[in-house]
Amino acid sequence: MKGIIGAIAGDVIGSAYEFNPTRDYNFELFTPKSTFTDDTVLTMANARWLLEDDTHSPERLVEIMLDMCRKYPDRGYGGRFARWIHDGNPQPYNSFGNGSAMRVSPVGYYAQTLEEALALAQISAEVTHDHPEGIKGAQATVAAIFLARQGKNKSEIRDYVKETFGYDLDRTLEDIRPTFTFDETCQRTVPEAITCYMEGTDYEDVVRLAVSLAGDADTLAAIAGSIASATEEVPNEITQPVIVRLSEELCTLLLRFNELVAKREAETAL
């Protein structure tokens, strides 16, 4: 399976190590603590928005995000975002946290042009993360997914992201590891997640590299995994333990979104 399952699986695998960091590449993929977090809830909120709202309005996205988050409380929402959920009039709060990037992968699979991908990523980010770095993190993630789907190689994707968004992608993971710590900003999550994708050989390798950075493990793995699954199959031995951890509603949304993406791809091919 390809597509947004890559973000969801990365989230579930990384969840056990978010506050129990590991630098061991050979960590256990699934533990009794492995579960979906806010990364998955908000990824599926974005997927539902694209399924239900042809106008792609920010107002409808907010409604869906609030509905999903209230259905799935206690999934590790950040402090400011948690207050946003329960605000009577939720407004953007100038955030540059990595939440904008962790939830945006459905846009990269839905969009039919790079311009559409970047525009939708901006809408997805701005309802909460309207700081330029928050928008940039979402757009860089979506651009990498979209370009990978279009058959661009890793060198071409790296060059585009560097030139367009100014991220330093010249560092290797060997350069990053010694000083890398837990960080929830786009600036210290998105470039590192993209580098994991660049150095990984397949989906599992990408996720293992992301989690073993010992940072914000579930989000690093969700972002890196969402890019990797644009071209790499997420193997059954990963997808099955993930799917059984999801609610029936989330499984249905995943299936419906995958069907929508397949339909749009078929229409583009005509």
Image (tube, grey):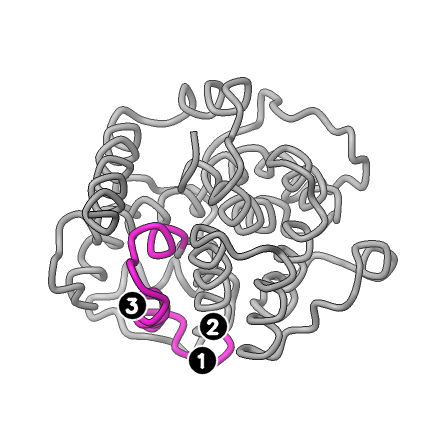
Which of labels 3 and 1 is toward the front?
3
Mark 2 packing: few (<14 Cα in 10 Å), some, or many (20+)?
A: many
The residue at the point 50 percent across, 68 percent down is 137
Q: Is residue 255 above or below residue 85?
A: above
Q: Amino acid at mark 2?
A: Gly
191 with respect to 115 (left or right): right
Mark 3 packing: few (<14 Cα in 10 Å), some, or many (20+)?
A: some
Q: Amino acid at mark 3?
A: Glu
118 with respect to 141 (left or right): left
Q: Main secondary structure of the magenta part?
A: helix
Q: Amino acid at mark 1?
A: His
Coordinates of residue 129 in the picture (x, y in percent):
40, 71
* Viewport quadrant of the N terminus: top left
Coordinates of residue 85 in the picture (x, y in percent):
30, 58
Q: Which residues are magenta?
A: 105-133
Local SS, label 3: helix
The residue at the point 44 percent across, 52 percent down is 77
As for residue 129 lying within the magenta part, the answer is yes
Name the residue that disc number 2 marks. 134
Report if the CB atoms under discs 1 and 2 are less than 8 Å apart: yes
Coordinates of residue 269 in the picture (x, y in percent):
25, 47
Kindly indicate the quadrant of the structure image that contains residue 186: bottom right
The residue at the point 27 percent across, 24 percent down is 248
Which of labels 2 and 3 is toward the front?
3
Kindly indicate the quadrant of the structure image that contains residue 259: top left
Coordinates of residue 74 in the picture (x, y in percent):
41, 42
Name the residue that disc number 3 marks. 116
The residue at the point 34 percent across, 73 percent down is 126
- Closer to the chain start, of discs 3 and 1, is 3
